[in-house]
Amino acid sequence: MSQRIQYYSTNRNLAGIPGLIPWKKSVSFREALLHGQAPDEGLFMPDPIPVITIESIMALKGKPYTRAAMLVATAFLADEIHNEVLEKIIAESYNYQVPIEKMIDRKYIMRLDQGPTASFKDFAARMMARLMSYFRDPGKRLNVLVATSGDTGSAVGDAFKGVAGIDVYILYPKGEVSGRQKKQLDTIGENVQAVSVLGKFDDCQNLVKQAFSDPSFAAFNLTSANSINFGRILPQIIYYVYAYAQLAASGEEIVFSVPSGNFGDALGCEYARRMGIPVKRLVMPTNENDEFPRFLETGVYEKISPSRACLSSAMNVGHPSNLARFFDLYGGTVDRGGAVHRYPDINDMRRWIFSTSITDEETRKTIRRAYDQYGILLEPHGAVGWRGLEAYLERYGDFPLCVSIETAHPAKFPDEIKDLLGINPELPDSMKDIDQKKGASFELPSSYEEFKNYLQTRLKVR
Ligand SMILES: *Cc1c(COP(=O)(O)O)cnc(C)c1O
């Protein structure tokens, strides 16, 4: 039997911060999943990180995605969940394609945009939803509250749709989502209710936070499905293992380029390397929110606040929430506000990670060049990834096997693509009928009393 994996907090070594008691214990995956974050507001970290052998990885060559998912998931969860249950969860989570397209020579694009909401967030949200359904207290309903400014809400909402024992409430700011985003959120249906709030994203987040700390909801099982949950990181390890097995010769080194915002996606690659994938370098390009590339260059970390509005809007992050995990893995500690308490080993980080900031201008040029030169259609996030990979190759004059990640479907950015290339990208099958779908949201003012009344009439205990 392997050593049991436990989950500790990234804040366990903090000292001397008023009102904060570092949490020095550890919990199982189940508790990390259901609680989301540690009692000291740190992020959960697995220890030890399980290792998979190169033989087991190479045995995935030519096999379906679900096989790679089983290899990674059992490495983490074999002690806590039966194989047959995991097989079922994985089969339901990954019932769509994961295309890998050749750009040139040994350089590939992996498209993580074929899920139901056409964003890579589907990969994590679908598996996490089913794990939550399995691990929840038997006989007790789980009520998930999510505040969203767009894409995360639709991926999470869709992932929980029809999942037994769970109800979901998605709060979004009425005036801040696009028409198509609103349509996506309002038409999920079944056990997922969209709540349109007359306010800003921060107002939605405050309503959710107040509900979590309100004793009148103590009898209900309220939880959040936010992006720092380790249950969303684990599934993001899988596609790196899958891509490696499909493309590499045994033991060959690979470079992955991952367009980065909150660093959850890139963290999946960091774990894949530590589990045994021969990752030569993890390239983490950002948009003009360049706090991380500047940190790698100067050794000093300064968050950007407020964050800069760029074309790759899902990456407009000035202090990535998963930076705390990267710091921890390299021996440092940074808190939620962005204050560094202990610096990580920067030379070790530079050895494994390359980061660079890509301007909107370069992003647009890259979309045009990828299409003209290689006939490959990228959207703004994927273009940041590809340009970042090119910058790495130019810097190091290197010719390894490379995979750059495309995180959203180009049809989600019709205006930009039309402007740049003069074409109208076709919606993926999963979204084809979106404009015709009917659905409705519940509209609320941004008042906690009203939200509380609303919840009280709807929440169910079992
Ligand atoms: C969320 C998102 C990203 C950024 O991923 P992180 O894990 O936050 O770094 C990139 N592209 C798209 C399309 C996204 O939705």
Image (cartoon, grey):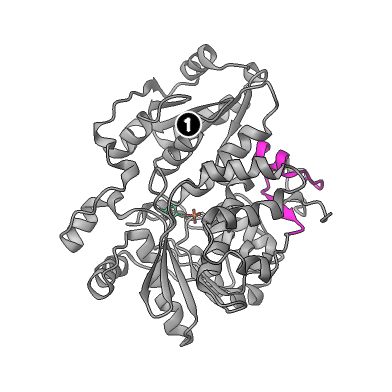
Residue 410 belongs to magenta span? no
**According to the image, label 1 marks what residue?**
161
**340 horizontally vs 189: left or right:** right
Using the rendered image of the protein, determine whether residue 202 is visible from the camera's viewpoint. Answer: yes
x, y (%) of residue 285? 45, 67
**Residue 12 vs residue 364, the one in the foreground:** 364
Please tell me whether mark 1 sits on a helix, a strand or a loop: loop
In the image, residue 36 lies in the stretch drawn in magenta: yes
Left/right of residue 164 with respect to residue 327 in the rendered view: left
Which residue is depicted at the point 46% across and 70% down?
403
Which residue is the extreme one toward the left?
A: 422
Q: How many marks?
A: 1
Residue 23 in the image, given as x and y percentages of width and height: 78, 45
User: Range of the magenta residues?
Assistant: 22-49
- Quadrant for residue 244, please give it: bottom right
Q: Residues within 10 Å of mark 1 (few under 14, many from 20)?
A: some
User: Is 39 placed above or below 101 here?
Assistant: above
| Vertical relation: 191 (above or below) 230 | above
Query: Residue shown at 45%/41% (left/top)?
Result: 155
Q: Position of residue 99 (x, y in %)?
A: 41, 60
